[in-house]
Amino acid sequence: METKYAPAAAPNTIVVFLPNWVGDVAMCTPALRELRHRYPAPCRIVGVGKPNLFNVLEGTPWLDETVAYDRRGKNADYHSTAVIARLRALQVDMAVLLASSLATAWVAWRSGARRRIGFPRNLRRWLLTDCVREPRSLWTKKPWPTIDQYLAVAAAAGCAVTSRSMDLTTTVKDEQAADRIWRDLALSGRRVVCVNNHSAAASSRWWPEDRLLALCRRVVEDPRNAILLLCGPREQDKTAGWTRQLDHPRIVSLAGQDMAIGTLKAVLRRGDLLVTTDSGPRHLAAALGTPVVVLQGPIDPQWSMNYHSSEIQLNKPVPCGPCGLETCPLADHPCMRGIEVEQVMRAAQRLLARAASGIRARGA
């Protein structure tokens, strides 16, 4: 892929309004990389976004500094008025909006940025100087991978788009935290299959619990394998309950362990495989080069395509989907229940065999 735009005038300071979800921050890394390549030092690139999501990008070289922005948070320093004051002090030349809310466009406008580049969604066309077009069929949006959307914004900012590959890294601190988890949970010397059955965005993406438990039992039939059940702070009780039900020495969980995003990155980086719903850990693992089996549900897979060459997507076509709903209105949840345990097991075995042969690569 080699799409080139006319070069933009060299700015001194660029602010990038980052997406609001873990997976989306991972998917915006190709755009951040292109911005850094197009505008090297002494140009300053400043990331603006939720403070907890900066950890996703920790260790990467694309942002010179960050400004925390969370207009609904409790800390007034992160609200719009304080953020606008900080951005005005930076004398911003260009604002690149990867977030699509009206509020971020308003903050970018108030910042004094002479160029404000983004999608004209959510009634914000009048706040932008450069509007990026979206593919449409009459009045309907065509599915468009999120990575490509962010790259289109970067291209409008003057970048040459050369790669869709996501790219994250871990820090020494992250790896030390993962070392402790591997030691505490006796994972050393095993093939570690990480399993994530959560999604902060929607319960409609969860795989039925009976299928999850059956898969875990199948995986540990091979004595080389261990299961590590992933979870966030809000999911610890449910995940610990699954571990108790399974009651197996090689099935453990992150419940009660370090919950930092950096630790999760290091865990995923050293895992041999991730089996996951369409959620943030999927894209973190892909950006770190870990093989992934993703259980697709109500979301059209074209939206979340991440171009990871070591990923297998499984889905069950159903008459009602892909619906995009956060909660399934049907009792039997057909799109997720239609994904069979043996399907997932075959995909997992295929990727583990590839990894054993040394075939483990990032996306193209």
Image (spheres, rainbow, N blue to C red):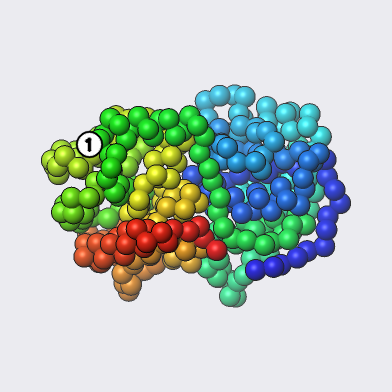
Q: Position of residue 320 (x, y in %)?
A: 34, 70
Decide if residue 263 is in sight here. yes
Residue at 27% across, 45% down: 190
Q: Is residue 54 above or below residue 24?
A: above
Q: Residue at x 28, y 42 (%)?
A: 189
Q: From this viewpoint, which residue is outermost toward the right? A: 9
Asked if residue 245 lies left or right of residue 275, the reply is left
Residue 201 image position (x, y, % from top left)? 41, 48
Element type where label 1 sits in the image: helix
Front residue (pair 94, 292): 292
Q: Residues within 10 Å of mark 1 (few under 14, many from 20)?
A: some
The residue sitting at 30% across, 47% down in the picture is 192
- Vertical comparison of 146 with 171: above or below: below
Q: The N terminus is located in which quarter? A: bottom right
Left or right, 90 with respect to 29, comes to: right
Relative to residue 188, is residue 145 depicted above or below? below
Please tell me which residue lies in front, 339 or 270.
Answer: 270
Q: How many marks?
A: 1
Query: Nearest the camera: 130 or 27?
Result: 27
352 relative to 64, above or below: below
Name the residue beneath numbered marker 1.
240
Residue 301, position in %: x, y? 44, 65
In the displayed structure, does residue 145 sit left or right of residue 121?
A: left
The C terminus lies in which quarter of the figure? bottom right
| Amino acid at dot 1 | Ala
| x 72%, y 40%: residue | 45
**Looking at the image, can residue 296 be seen?**
no
Q: Position of residue 165 (x, y in %)?
A: 57, 58
